[in-house]
Image (spheres, coloured by chain):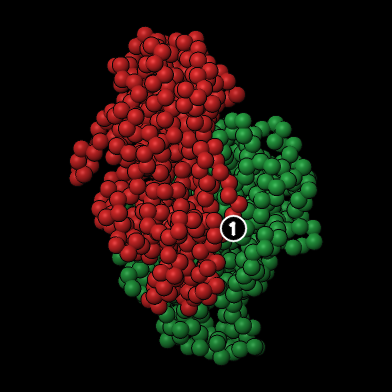
Chain colours: A green, B red
Amino acid sequence: MKGNVIVGQSGGPTAVINSSLAGVYRTAMDRGAKKVYGMRFGIQGLLEELYIDLSDHIKNELDIEILKRTPSAFLGTCRYKLPAIHENQEIYVKLFEILNKLDIECFIYIGGNDSMDTIKKLSDYAILTGQTQKFVGVPKTIDNDLALTDHTPGYGSAAKYIATSTKEVIRDGIGFSFNKQQVIIIEIMGRNAGWLTGASALAKGEDCDGPDLIYLPEVPFDTEAFLSRTRNLLEKKNTVVVAISEGIRFQDGTYVSEASGNADYVDAFGHKQLTGSATYLANVVSRELGCKTRAVEFSTLQRSASHLASRVDINEAFMVGGAAVKAADEGDSGKMVVIDRVSDDPYQCATGIYDVHKIANGEKLVPRNWITEDGTYVTEDFIDYVKPLIQGDYPSVMVNGIPRHLYMKE
Amino acid sequence: MKGNVIVGQSGGPTAVINSSLAGVYRTAMDRGAKKVYGMRFGIQGLLEELYIDLSDHIKNELDIEILKRTPSAFLGTCRYKLPAIHENQEIYVKLFEILNKLDIECFIYIGGNDSMDTIKKLSDYAILTGQTQKFVGVPKTIDNDLALTDHTPGYGSAAKYIATSTKEVIRDGIGFSFNKQQVIIIEIMGRNAGWLTGASALAKGEDCDGPDLIYLPEVPFDTEAFLSRTRNLLEKKNTVVVAISEGIRFQDGTYVSEASGNADYVDAFGHKQLTGSATYLANVVSRELGCKTRAVEFSTLQRSASHLASRVDINEAFMVGGAAVKAADEGDSGKMVVIDRVSDDPYQCATGIYDVHKIANGEKLVPRNWITEDGTYVTEDFIDYVKPLIQGDYPSVMVNGIPRHLYMKE
């Protein structure tokens, strides 16, 4: 590699997005990059010429290990969508001026669907204007909704957190199950795809019954059917645990969270902020079935709990970061690294590379036949798919009793 | 020991209440108990003759280790307050019939303030009626509000979870801090005592600024002052993180959670269920300051996250369980085991024993001089007190990627 590398992070963070950053840095240095720059706050920060030299922050091998265990976007993230090239060329001119000034050869962007759109537009613009920079995307999202990759880094750790926390919430609940009925509703992230919510099924095992009902956004939510099932369950057991996706919708397409009367907050990508579905349904159960209820939201913890990251996930995140640099250095552009599952048992994966034009903005949902016919649980196929992704631990480096993170001194 | 031991768990569970149960079992067996019974669902289950022989469930040393890592009350818990002896003697007659039938010599009850009231009444009744059973309490509560003991088992692990999760939430928040202001409000358990909420300050360190504001229930909450401080902070930084206790009250004594319009749910001990303060304040901030907000509730996870238990806490919980059996076997009754801090640095603790008449129902609050004068943070004295309690890990036994628990097969 003759020039420099720049790397950015975009969209909602994960527990392992910094492991990908570490992988980018390591491979870029190994391949002889003179400088590895980090965009502050993704492309949005870069437009204001906010970037750092990563060598100023990653001083040694220990820092790389700490970075791999640091949640959220070390570089800062953004939710920023580039305009179409014909709509606003100026922004592209400006960005490429910055890239040329920094002698960037490889541009690596770690993100989800919206971020791959950035890779697509930048590589298109480079080709249109005859510039030589290579643009490669690194998949990242807890939502696991990116097409063409077997799964996305970040998903396995979120799934491990959700499985573990669901199990702990169930244990907490059944301890109180004497002569008292209660329904606990756990709200899990996932706007359109139920990958995260389905992972709550992993709580089930020899020592735990798992949730009783699981509702994914892929299947319309029917309040009457839900109440009827819950009522039936309460005839057999005193503690009923229900896992729901924040994105569940009624048959008419409106979000359950809208019924809760929450103000509609819309983010920069035009996505509605969804929250409050569990509280809403807990109130419905309390009113209709007359039992004690509790709503639990895993909130941002499910995407930031590095202390419970999956070893498989951390290692794969590191691997895809490195693979992206290798691909760009070897001339790929407008591509995203993907994870191909080579074997289910024993679990083996390898990286591949795909044209980002085929990936951007296509959401991968849970296949309907991985959800039970009645739409209240996931199937064994779902569990077989996700189980390998939560395996192994990556113990935090504990300092003063809590996990150490790599910190950017301003 | 000639007779048998019975042990129960009561009140809200903790991440280490089963480590105390394991300690009771181990010491009872070591001291020659013929049988160690476990009450199902505390005294309330015992009144219906629900109990188990613990040897049927703890088969070997590995089971003891798994039990120490199992959250929530393995035996089941209850929120049940015995009537005064003169109000209802029948219930005491019935309980002692059961104890005599089971040849109980030592009655160990693991619980908080309300549970120590049970120990007091039962030991009083035994003395009044000339019976020989010994009744000893084992302290347990995440709230750390028991008098006379330096701290309570369960608090250290909850504090470790809160410190770690607060740090992860802060990291998640600052990743988004470009050109956008946001206020994140974290709601932490604690009705009257701010020990848990104060522990969020432990997130602060070389690699994290910690929360910006901490509001404990010991100091009246002033919405205007809170808004003014938040406004000032937003002039200096884009992400402001506020930790509040669920039990914060306005100057007039009403709970902030009441202002949220939540229905007043009252539990069996007459305590109001508090929840929704963070959401309420997030809405106030959003309305008054016009920035993005997020409310995060740590919910039951803070008392059940055994996967992040403190080693100091697990070991102390085990130790006080054993000390209670030893005390009862040596003739103590109407007593609670306490933890005495022998030394701050290096941290050393030993068990002591106190008359439960001095303990029951007296809540230990955070001393006013451990809260800053303006009531928006805790002092170094507070931090020095709690820091030793979150030290060390007790790694979960992971099976299929998630922590294994000891499970009672029905």
Residue B200 sits above or below residue A50 on the image: above
Residue B209 sits above or below residue B130 on the image: below
- Residue B341: x, y in percent? 24, 38
The reply, left or right, for residue B133 in relation to residue B56 is left
Which residue corresponds to the image point at 55% horizontal and 24% vertical from the top-left?
B45
Q: Which residue is mark 1?
A: B261
Image quarter of residue A62 = bottom left
Which residue corresponds to the image point at 50% horizontal and 58% vertical from the top-left?
B256
Which of A166/B276 is in front? Answer: B276
Residue B225 sits above or below residue B168 on the image: below
- Residue B165: x, y in percent? 44, 54
- Residue A156: x, y in percent? 55, 52
Residue at the farthest front position: B86
The reply to whether residue A123 is visible in this rendering is: no
Which residue corresponds to the image point at 56% horizontal and 63% vertical from the top-left?
A139
Q: Residues within 10 Å of mark 1 (few under 14, many from 20)?
A: few
Q: Chain of mark 1?
A: B
Which of B393/A324 is in front? Answer: B393
Which residue corresponds to the image point at 34% horizontal and 54% vertical from the top-left?
B202
Which of A274/A353 is in front? Answer: A274
In which quadrant is the N terminus of chain B drawn? top left
Q: What amino acid does circle 1 point to? A: Gly
The reply, left or right, for residue A106 in relation to residue A85 is left
- Residue A383: x, y in percent? 64, 44
Which of B179/B141 is in front? Answer: B141
The reply to whether residue A101 is visible in this rendering is: yes
Q: Secondary structure at mark 1?
A: loop
Residue A14 sits above or below residue B53 on the image: below
